[in-house]
Image (cartoon, coloured by chain):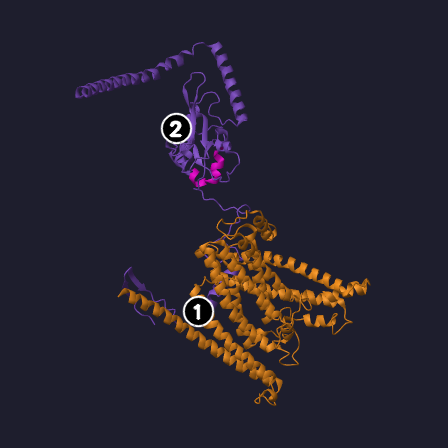
Amino acid sequence: MYDMLAALINGTLGWGWPEWALNLLSYILVVTIVLVVAPLQMLFFTYYERRVIARMQDRVGPNRVGPEGIWQPIADGVKMFTKEDIVPQAADRIVHFLAPCVVVAPTVLMFAVVPWGPGMVPVDLPTGLLFFFAISSISAVGLMMAGWASNNKFSLLGAMRAVAQMVSYEIPAVLSLIAIVIVVGSLSINDIIAYQTGLIVSNRDLPGIPDLGLGWFVFTPVGFVAFIAFFIAALAEGERTPFDIPEADSEIVAGYMTEYSGMKFGLFYLAQYVLNFLLCAITAIIFFGGWQGPGVGWLYAQGITPENPNGNGLFNVLAGVLGVFYFLLKTYLFFFVMVWLRGALPRLRIDQLMDFGWKFLIPLTLANLFSAALWVAFTRWGPAEGMLITVGWSPVLRWLAAFVVTLAINLGVYLWLTRVYAASQAERRRAELEELIAAGS
Amino acid sequence: MTASPFEIEIPRGRVIEVQRDDTRVRRGTGLLRGMAVIWKHWKESFKLNRSYSQIHGTFTIEYPEERPRIPEAYRNMPILLYDDETGHELCTSCFQCERICPPQVIHMTQAKDPATGKPVPAVAEFIIEYDACMSCGFCAEVCPFDAIKMDHEFELSTDDHLRLTVHKEQLLRPISYYAHIAPTMWAEVREGALKKLQGNIRRRPDVIGLAPQLTEKIAARRAELAAQAAQAAQAAAATPAPPAAPAAAAPAPAEGRKLTPEEKAAKLAAIRAANAAKKQQSGDGS
């Protein structure tokens, strides 16, 4: 944004503004765009989810307000705004008021590092990925505040479940991302996207592959397992079915949102859907190349870039439009999968959730971490790092060896873990029965 | 692997473990199978399903635009029928419906011949309180003249409460309307109803029994009656003998009626005697 404004104001118009003014203006513009885009995504997602889940349940879904019901979220928003704001008498008023803010703020902050297209990232932090997940865990504090301040048993139960779930599923989420970080060698989200050029195979691993922007991590054994583990963990972090235990409406009313009404409830809702959007977006970015896709790289290379200052500005716009299109397409596709899972699966019990997170996902992602290290060793290390087997191998052979080895390890670990996990579940059932028998005799 | 059901006694009762055979390792394929089911539902939901023999497809009838075909025997609120051709109401105000109505929302007054003051088989005013009607359909079932029937109209919501106290003008529908919404049900009773109606029309003097909104029919009937009266006057001027005939005919039913009051008097006397005897008994007892 700064480059664009500098080119426009000081270059084309020749006003000669100082640097700080340009910086200020560019940040204000970016923040405005982000703050407008975030709620719009949430509005669209509520409509999108309701229509899709309705179709999955052989219904039609909201189609009354506007063409095909597209203004339904606006109508819902108006309803939320006009509702009475009720604070329970026994509630801690200040914390009760602050909780929705604490939940919403981090979700909006997370937009700061999300790249929408080539060169379209609000802030390109060198530690973007870390920032993203560090900020996302702040909302757990807000949830606990909401549950505690409401002074309601359902709220407190919901909040404790939410925090327990978020804390335990952050571990597999981050472990699966670390595997990708090891392969890329950077925490910058832009670097991760830049790595995924090529065709099925990233051309950073295997130079000479034609660049169609399809060298996504999901096509490698390491990336695939990381993707599955991360997506499951993302479902739990976003409190999506089958992990919507914190707000299990059939058990604890609405969890931590029980005592909220009107726009405060609306803010929780907003935070949840914005978080879901961001989780889908980050899944698309890290495992499916974000804005990478056929044509974007070539278009962007023709435009004005730091490497090519004499390019044509039109190509920047084209590359941006195409990139945003690919990015949103992938993101909406993942949200579709989230809704699909919601249609297909019932809610887990809290102990099943914990079992699955700690006994299955974490070992799987740890093994995947080892695979990622081997991947780096096979594709990049030489005798200097102590990797003597691959001396003299061609890049294709190195890549093939890495693929086969990591595939064997990941598949083996998966098969072994499923067997162990099933056995442990059977054992637990047997133990429960034995307890019953002991109580009976 | 199927084990026999496991059964134990615990202090609170009996526990039976059902072997669900879910101990085998599925490795995530169960999840995929479930998702495949939902995918099929999603894919097929873009087709309409009107046969109700399939589980896929959208069943929804989008009400204000699309309307379901209402079954013939559907019943909502009672209406009154009148004959299309003659304009005569089928109702004879026999009070059967008023008597059977469980929430007692049917009210009517019988029409009287203005000349003689005697009741006529027609209804003067008929009121149904739709707001309290429970749509049981007893009135339509009990009606011996098939004059009251159940309507298919169900969009009755209004902000005007008084509008739900419905008077005869609003209750009346032509027979052709009912024959349209319930063809087979009307065909079953058509002949008898029309025959009874013809009998009743003959006993209705003046314009009594004509649906009040059919002003043309009423005007025509008035003109006809005036013409008849004029003719009769002419005939009377010509021959004064005919009035003797009705006068002679009149005493016959009157005599027939005379028997009843006598019986009544006898009955009354018997009851009075019985009561007096009872009183005496109770007086002796005390």
Identify the secondary structure beneath mark 1: helix
Rendering coords of residue A438 (x, y %): 29, 67
Q: Quadrant of the C terminus of chain A?
A: bottom left
Tell me the subunit letter for badge 1. A
Q: Quadrant of the N terminus of chain A?
A: bottom right
A312 or A18: nearer the viewer = A18
Rendering coords of residue A24 (x, y %): 72, 62
Residue for badge 1: A355
Q: Was residue B81 drawn as part of the magenta stretch in this picture? A: no
Residue at image location 74% in from the left, 70% down from the top: A303
Circles 2, 1 touching at the beta carbon (< 8 Å) = no
Q: Colour of chain B?
A: purple
Q: Amino acid at mark 2?
A: Phe
Rendering coords of residue A347 (x, y %): 45, 62
Magenta: main secondary structure equals helix
Residue at image location 66% in from the left, 69% down from the top: A124
Q: Is residue A185 left or right of residue B253?
A: right
Q: Is residue A141 left or right of residue A211?
A: left
Rendering coords of residue A98 (x, y %): 56, 55
Part of the protein shown in magenta: B172-186
Tell me the subunit letter for badge 2. B
Identify the secondary structure beneath mark 2: loop
Distance between mark 2 and mark 1 Cα atoms: 74 Å
**Could you say which quadrant of the image residue A18 lies in?**
bottom right
Is B265 placed above or below B5 here?
A: above
Mark 1 is surrounded, within 10 Å at the Cα level, by few (under 14), some (14 to 19) or many (20 or more) other residues, namely some
B218 or A214: nearer the viewer = A214
Residue for badge 2: B95
